[in-house]
Image (cartoon, rainbow, N blue to C red):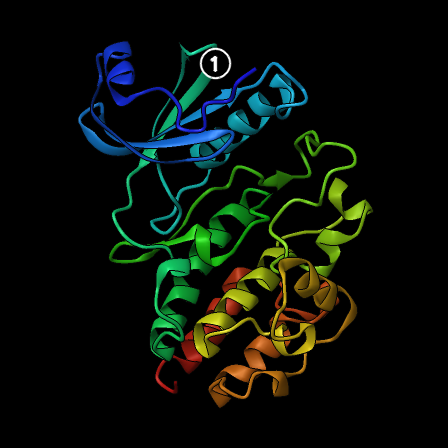
Amino acid sequence: MRINSEGPPPNVIASEWDDVTDVEYVTGGAQKSVYRAVVNGEDAALKLVSVFHDEEEGPDPETVLAYWQREIRVLSTCQADTLVRLVDWAPRTIAHDNQLYVAYAEEFIDGPSMAEMDLPMAPSEVVKLGLDICTALSSLHEKGWQHRDVKPGNIVYDQRYVLVDPGIAFSDEEPNITETGCMPPGTSGFRSPEQCDYWSRYGAFDGRADLFSLGIVLAIGFAGYHPYEAIAGSDATGRSLQSAIICVEWDPSCCPALPASTIPILSRLLRRHAHQRYRTADQLSTALEEILGKV
């Protein structure tokens, strides 16, 4: 089966649904295509997820649908101004070019991701980012969800910093849909040590894993480079960074560019053992508020 990485053309989508207009293609990959569109009168990011039927081409349809349904459940049950918001979650499907797509719409955030910003960022701006993402994580964690993929590419700015893409979020009350034999959920170089443990893939970690990932994000914002880069080497890859995270306790001397007032916070966030980190996003938020005027 040929995989169309760009999804259906905008005119095909606009002709399929009466309440969807002004469709523009934004980006896409092997499984998901994103469009900017007006959905029910609101500017939205319309996401189409392709349902594969050839196992060699991608996940089986049941897995694709499970992730799609999970992201909708997460965003329909967790609300925060700094967590991306659902615009429309009514079931939608569209067929095109021998592909079946399921769709949903989120608010369109017209701004860059942290991965697209100049680094290092102003220290006070990094603290604000941390506070905003703590608010989003607190909303998720209070409902029993872990995001599992906190990274610069999933933090977007538009008058505030917004956490997006909870498609691989996990809850102990949800059935596991991670495929046997695949990599742990998340992005190499940003997973907590416990996220990479085989048994942890099946629920043996909590929201403190997200706080570890946020610690890496904050360190990158403050210093301009990954906090484990000095350990993994200047030519570090995601895999070598992840190996360093698993094997080595982080030392702040690896990041001489860090503002002194941030080191106690980052040192606690980046502890290898979860019980030594902040317990909650609210607790981290309090610590960040205390240094807001000192960086």
Q: What element carries label 1?
A: strand
Q: In this view, does 179 lie above or below 212?
A: above
Q: Where is residue 143 in the image (x, y as percent from the top left)?
A: 54, 42
Residue drawn at (45%, 51%) of the image: 154
Quadrant hosting residue 145: top right
Query: In this image, 282 relative to 185: left or right?
Result: left
**Count of residue discs:** 1
Residue 69 higher or lower than 274, as above or below? above
Dot 1 amino acid type = Gln
Q: Mark 1 points at which residue?
A: 99
Residue 207 found in image quarter: bottom right
Question: Measuring 65% from the left and 44% from the top, which residue is drawn there?
Answer: 185
Residue extending furthest right?
199
Residue 79, image quadrant: top left
The residue lying at 38 percent from left, 79 percent from top is 123
Any part of residue 18 in sight: yes
Q: Nearer the viewer, residue 271 or 145?
A: 271
Q: In which quarter of the image is the C terminus?
A: bottom left
In the picture, measured across the screen, residue 107 lies left or right of residue 153, that is: left
